[in-house]
Image (tube, rainbow, N blue to C red):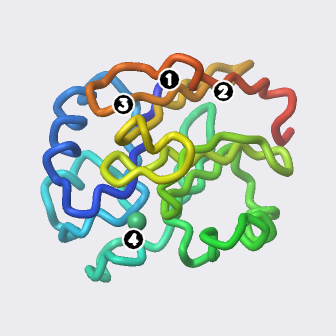
Amino acid sequence: MDYLIVSDTHGDREILEQLVVHYQGQVRAMFYNGDSELDADDELFKTLLPVRGNVDFDAMFPDDRTYRDQDIAIYQTHGHLFHTEVGINWLLTQVEPMQVDVVTVGHTHQLGSEVLEQKLFINPGSISLPRGPYAYLKGTYAILSVTPKELKVQYYTRDFKPVEGLEFTFKRADLRK
Ligand SMILES: [Mn+2]
């Protein structure tokens, strides 16, 4: 089962539309982690599952979401409510009691995937305004692939091509029991 994760378009509606067209019917769900600067009733959000970012002013966006599928539970939030721009510790404390396998955020515009406290944290980076060591890729999103034994995260660029070297595999045995 594959899941698309994308964040921080900041008005770049075009790329979201392209992703929806490209991945419709190809993935189980599409997560949008905030800062679209679109209205919550935009038709893209009939397909993309959004949360509210710090520059989303439409209060109809939810602050967070816990998504449960047959083999995975994912907690999704933008990150600003947990001040992830200054570090991940507060978020880590708050998600600790949650019965989820994956925590996915945006906000920092920097991609990253790592296991902390037996949960897999995934930031897809910003597809439109990337920052940090991978900013040279000019924007990224992530595909999470879920199997009973492994979680795999592959980063892609705006041309829907996988980035060599940005593929990470995590054994489910190392995640929450
Ligand atoms: Mn942002």
* Distance between the alpha carbons at the discs numbered 1 and 3: 21 Å
Does residue 19 lie above or below 82 as drawn? Answer: above
Among numbered discs 2 and 4, the one appearing first in the sequence: 4
- What residue sits right under mark 4 in the picture? 52
* Distance between the alpha carbons at the discs numbered 3 and 4: 23 Å
- What residue sits right under mark 2 in the picture? 151
Among numbered discs 1 and 3, the one appearing first in the sequence: 1
SS under mark 2: strand
Residue contact between numbered discs 1 and 2, judged by CB atoms under 8 Å: no
Query: Of the residues tagged 1 and 2, which is closer to the observer?
Result: 2
- What residue sits right under mark 3 in the picture? 157
- What residue sits right under mark 1 in the picture? 1
| Disc 1 within 8 angstroms of ligand 1 (CB) | no
Q: Nearer the viewer, residue 156 or 115?
A: 156
The amino acid pointed to by label 2 is Leu
* Distance between the alpha carbons at the discs numbered 1 and 2: 10 Å
Please indicate whether residue 138 sits to the left or right of residue 15 in the image. Answer: right
The amino acid pointed to by label 1 is Met
SS under mark 1: loop
Rendering coords of residue 136 (x, y %): 42, 38
The amino acid pointed to by label 4 is Arg
Q: Nearer the viewer, residue 39 or 123?
A: 123
Residue drawn 30% across and 24% down? 160
Please indicate whether residue 72 sits to the left or right of residue 36 in the image. Answer: right
The image quadrant in which ligand 1 is located = bottom left
Among numbered discs 2 and 3, the one appearing first in the sequence: 2
Residue contact between numbered discs 3 and 4, judged by CB atoms under 8 Å: no
